[in-house]
Image (tube, rainbow, N blue to C red):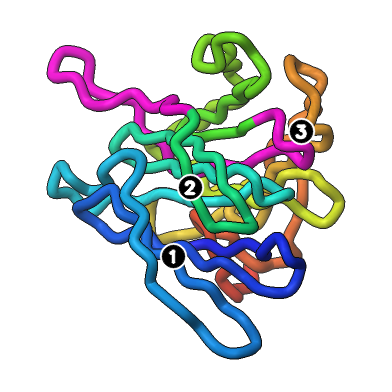
Amino acid sequence: MTAVKHGNGRDWWLLVHPFFSNDFYEYLITPAGISGPMLLSVGSCIACNNTDDQGQMVFSKDGSKLCMANTYGILDIFDFDRCTGSLTLNLNLGMPYNPLNGWTTFYGCSFSADGSVLYASRFDTLWQYNLNASNVKASRLYLMGLDNAKYAIGQHMIGPDNKIYIATARNSNSNDSLDYKLSVINYPDSVGYAFDLRPHSIWLGGIAAEAGYLIYHIMS
């Protein structure tokens, strides 16, 4: 589920994606109330492999693009019209399951502030895509990896400073120092290696950031 402000600067669009379909349920929220849902059938089918898929769905800062990342190899980029609420599939950067090669899962995603660069991650790898490249899928650049037996790269969020913050989770019931830190991309609009990624560099003061939520637990 995610939301973005209407083109009129007052109302809001709320989008929800159910399992076992390529449907979005779209709601319009105004001072008069909530209308909808309107059904938008577009993009990849979520959980159609009959698994409990996970992922992230985020709008670009200007609301013109939507990214949907999913653990069954889905990475869809949509164009969104904030005035009409229309949603159109622009790119499918995913790598669907292949019995011979397996698949590349995705979990977290984020856009740079100007919407020209996409960051996407699976649980052990973070990548950058140049959305202005002639071949966006081929522009994929490896940024960071983790030992997935111990840790997982979590969800992304762009901050008010236009930097992108990324959570880390530990793949066990315990916590250690990395759970209490965020990674940050300081210049996410920069393609190539000028983005200045600082892994696990921001201390959260004893609050643990799991895959995509905060746990109020102070380290002893």
On screen, 109 above or below 92?
A: below
Q: Is residue 105 magenta?
A: yes
User: Residue 147: percent from the left, percent from the top?
Assistant: 46, 31
Q: Is residue 70 magenta?
A: no
The answer to whether 210 appears left or right of 180 in the picture is left
Q: Which mark is residue 87?
A: 2
Q: Residues within 10 Å of mark 1 (few under 14, many from 20)?
A: many
Q: Which mark is residue 74?
A: none
Magenta highlight range: 91-117
Q: Nearer the viewer, residue 148 or 57?
A: 57
Count of marks placed on residues: 3
On screen, 91 above or below 88?
A: above
On screen, 122 above or below 166?
A: above
Q: Nearer the viewer, residue 88 or 153?
A: 88
- Report which residue position mark 1 lands on: 26
Q: Which mark is residue 188?
A: 3
Please report whichever mark, 2 or 3, sits nearer to the chain's N-terminal start.
2
Please report whichever mark, 1 or 2, sits nearer to the chain's N-terminal start.
1
Between the residue at mark 1 and the residue at mark 3, the CA separation in whole angstroms equals 29 Å
Q: Is residue 61 visible?
A: yes
